[in-house]
Image: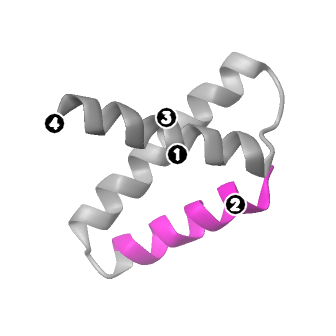
Amino acid sequence: MSELFTRLQSELVSARKAQDKPRTLLLSTIISDAKNRKIELMRDLTDDDVVDVIRKGIKRRKESV
């Protein structure tokens, strides 16, 4: 598992404990997208893969606005 993915998971736990709903929603969406990408690639993700997932998420949300 990539260090970035692990950090995102720990940040999600912190956001949930702080009851920060927007941050929790954002992090859970990123983690979900990353898990889907891991299944698609059939291998553990690298930090570059996680960054790519985040970039695609940003692009998708900009287009929807």
Q: Position of residue 44 (x, y in %)?
A: 82, 36
User: What number is the disc on residue 56?
Assistant: 3
Q: Position of residue 31 (x, y in %)?
A: 52, 46
Magenta residue check for 35: no
Q: Nearer the viewer, residue 60 or 33?
A: 60
Q: Position of residue 33 (x, y in %)?
A: 51, 35
Residue carrying label 2: 4
Range of residues picked out in magenta: 1-16
Q: Residue furthest bottom?
A: 18
Q: Quadrant of the rendered structure where residue 25 is?
A: bottom left
Q: CA distance from mark 4 to mark 3?
A: 15 Å
Question: Of circles 2 and 1, which is in front?
Answer: 1
Mark 1 surroundings within 10 Å by alpha-carbon count, few (fewer than 14), some (14 through 19), many (20 or more): some
SS label for mark 2:
helix
Q: Quadrant of the C terminus?
A: top left
Q: Position of residue 37 (x, y in %)?
A: 63, 27
